[in-house]
Amino acid sequence: MYALALIAALAASSTGQQATLPDAERIFQAYGAGDYDTCSRLIISYDASSVPAPVNAPLLAAECLSRQNRFAQAFDYLRRHIPRGDISMEDLRTKDRPGLDALRKQPQWPAFLADAEKLDAARIARMDMPLHDEILRRIAIDQQAQHASIDNKYAQPQMDALAAVNRDNLAWLRSTLMNAKRWPGRTQVGADGSNALWLLLQHADGDVALQRRALDLMTRAESGEVSPIDQAMLTDRVLVNEGKPQHYGSQFSTADKGTMTMKPADTDSEAELDARRAAVGLPSLADYRQQLREMYHTTVQ
């Protein structure tokens, strides 16, 4: 579910989060309606929480601020988020949007871009790029095999190929994480690397002890290093694999007729599950079911 994870972005502390943060759909609806003030306010509201804004939203915040001629605020916002790895420098330089085009025409743009490139270079210099690149190499192979199995309706040749990929990744994950002293988080491998590592672990059901070890590392990580969405979904995966009820309602099973049904949770209240999900940035169960339908081309209850 890498595509789902990227769409949602989705990260936060599962404790102390009282207000429900806006989801990506509300943000992009506001932008599509030309309500740039609401769009920017919704995205900036994430700054007061421990939940990172949805993927691509930080650059959209700058776009929306610029569309209101709030150029100084747009530059300040970008300066805060570039060191976090929230802004694609390529998109910042070239993405064709009216607000971004207007920013590039401002007299302070050349100096700002020079500063932005230094901030991003400093962020990359702190990263473990060999580990980052290896994680992304493995997730690309994983996703190719996962989608091949889905597209071919789980035919045996594709399932055998997927099993081989999972075995190789499982061995690598064991060697990388079982003796690790900390979770490879945003500082070490970037948000994309940390998220991709989580997804590899979601597919490591052959070793629940490894998944539990990774979850323990996530739990002990410093604030901002781990996507709370990733942590929440791995929490559910570990609980289900340990034979326990899940906490966020993220895990579904497929019956013989292909219908996907949510596995048992520790509450029968979907409203309570939705509140837990909102606290960590996950979409509502209704939206999640629709995403599963579109991804797996099947009925979801």
Image (cartoon, helix red, strand yellow):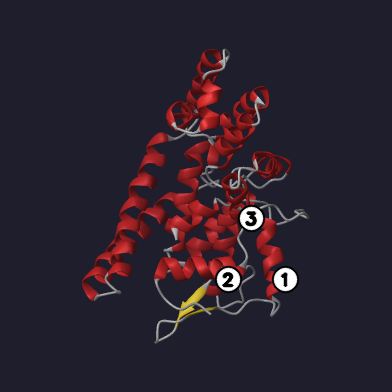
Residue at 49% x, 39% y: name it.
190
Residue designated by label 1: 272
Residue designated by label 3: 281
Label 1: state its secondary structure: helix
Q: Give the x, y percent position of residue 222.
A: 64, 43
* CA–CA distance in space, label 2 to label 3: 20 Å
Query: Is 148 placed left or right of 113 in the picture?
Result: left
Marks 2 and 3: CB-CB under 8 Å? no
Residue at 44% x, 56% y: name it.
3
Between residue 122 and residue 97, name the one nearer to us.
Answer: 97
* Label of residue 239 in the image: 2
Q: Amino acid at mark 2?
A: Leu
Between residue 176 and residue 132, name the one nearer to us.
Answer: 132
Q: Quadrant of the N terminus?
A: bottom left
Marks 1 and 2: CB-CB under 8 Å? no
Mark in front: 2 vs 3: 3
Q: Give the x, y percent position of residue 217.
A: 57, 52
Mark in front: 1 vs 2: 1
Q: Is residue 281 above or below residue 103?
A: below
* Label of residue 168 in the image: none
Ranked by sequence position, the earlier of labels 2 and 3 is 2
